[in-house]
Image: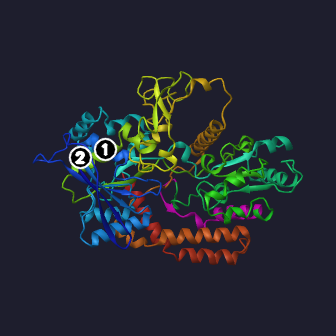
Amino acid sequence: MNKRIISLLLALVTVLSLTACGKPSSGGGNADGEQITLRMGVSGKSNVSEWDNNALVLWLEEQSGYNLEIEVFSADKGERATQIATMVAGGEPLPDVMCYFALNQDLQNTYGKDGYLLDLLPYFKDEAFIDSLAQKYDGFNYVKHVEKNCEEDVKARYLTEGCSPEGQLWAFPSLGVSQGDQPRNMLFINQSWLDKLGLEMPTNIEELTHVLTEFVTKDPNGNGKADEMGMVGSVNIARGDIPSWLINNYIYLNDNYMANCTDDGQIYLPYDRDEYRQGVKAVHEMYEKGLIAELTWTIKEASELPALFSPADEVSKIGVWAGHPTLRVTAGNPTLYEYTGLLPFEGAYAAFEPLSISTNSYVSGETEYPEEAFEILYLLSTPEGQRRQRYGEYGVDWEWAPCVPECEVCAGKGINGDGMAMKIINSDAYTGQTTSTFANYLVGSLHLRNVTVPGHEERDVPFGHFAKDPASLDDEITWSEYRSKMASDHAKGYMAHADANNPKNIVNKLNYTTEETELMGNAKTDISTYAKEMRAKFITGEIDINDDAVWDNYVKTIHSLNWDNYITCVQAAWDRKNAG
């Protein structure tokens, strides 16, 4: 079997042909009895050292019976979009399957209408077709799986959120975000410092100001140095934007989506509101008192955070830090034990990311084999496809192991009811150089890995559940277990607060018509960029937030950035989404 890897460069498309041995046809033939070959485009990753004989590619071929020619595109999202545009402009057909290309909604609609992407909704709606795939792949029906296991909100959005305004579904929808990833910002406070100084957990801005003042003036880390900082995060890195967390005490603010909505359905932007200004003033006052470190605006790379949040000398320096614990602390550093989650204050809002429905993978509208191309994405969404995408090859990167009745996820039943769950053998398939995966793509429903059994016995145990080692039951909680529990407890508390305190209407992902997209132009980017730039200047005192003339000029400028047209288009998309 001959296979090609086509590495597409930004300015020039270069075709490389490689030959490898493979499997014979196993039911993957066309009408003439010849084995079907599908071109499969993938998003290149530097840590994938083998594409031609990648274990995931070989498994897809073995299971489907089709020959896959792998075409490796740029790892950069923008460059991938340019490569697609170059192929379209040059009349070169797109790959039959495009795995994790992450085209924006406007490009999807444009390419779909022009015939370059296939509308997948009819395939999802064809029960007989989906049943035939379920029969081929161990009885797994993806549509019924979503109906059984997903939250009501996700079920309602699953096949509609990614649709164009005209109702076409140009992408294979994937469910990717777990509850642990939903908080827009995650803050953790040094409980050991609170205890040492005899302080209570703060419940409002005034109390937080007092606590932070004590932190930076009373030497709570006990090293005799004035090296304590109040709050440290990063406005440039996910879940670290301390200023926006504080402003949510005054107005709902989620810069990812920008728009807010009144209870009666009227769209507005928060950036010109008196409540927003009041929130910015409060953050400015904390900054002026030295309670928010300037590092919060200057840190650009996530790699800068672990040494701050968990210092090498194991002496805590920060009273409150912001970021996801799984990604922002040094493994094994004991300072982590000093921290606990700081939840939003009573009456404050809690900006969040919805359980996402990603639309990143596609089937070519010009493919000769539409059902077969759809089948490859479906195969990746099966339980084994999910595990292989994420964790690699069975027997090489992971294996089955018995779980225990005390397990809080499966209660001893395991993933398939036989008491067995996963155990990692080789973590490189997930975090290092790999020949077993495409470096952790998300095609399917990986967010279900965090759905737990208690209270939800009717749901399946997550595909990626890991066995709890019986030998560890009597052990003290490990550092990694503490970190996971710390993040999980915070996320649960945060989302419970969001449910109880957030506005009735939350604006998240919306789909726009071509006309609306043209009318908005670059408004979203321009408004967001200017709002964040000015917020930083107001907070750090570069510009006086208390000067009415300065504020009025700021409002005039931000309104000039196609503000009214942007709101008009968001309103139209919101009304369309919520019609009926």
Can the viewer see residue 516 in this picture?
no
Question: Percent x, y for residue 393?
Answer: 41, 40
Name which residue lies at 58% across and 77% down.
Answer: 556
Q: Is residue 386 above or below residue 232?
A: above
Left or right of 14 in this view: 311: right
The residue labelled by disc 1 is 60
Q: Nearer the viewer, residue 169 or 281?
A: 169
Residue 138 disc label:
none
- Which segment did they paint magenta? 263-286
Q: Are marks 2 and 1 in contact (CB under 8 Å)?
A: yes
Left or right of 26 in this view: 470: right
Q: Nearer the viewer, residue 85 or 249?
A: 85
Magenta span has 267? yes
How many residues crowd around disc 1 within 10 Å: few (fewer than 14), some, or many (20 or more)? some
The residue labelled by disc 2 is 66
Name which residue lies at 45% across and 31% down.
Answer: 461
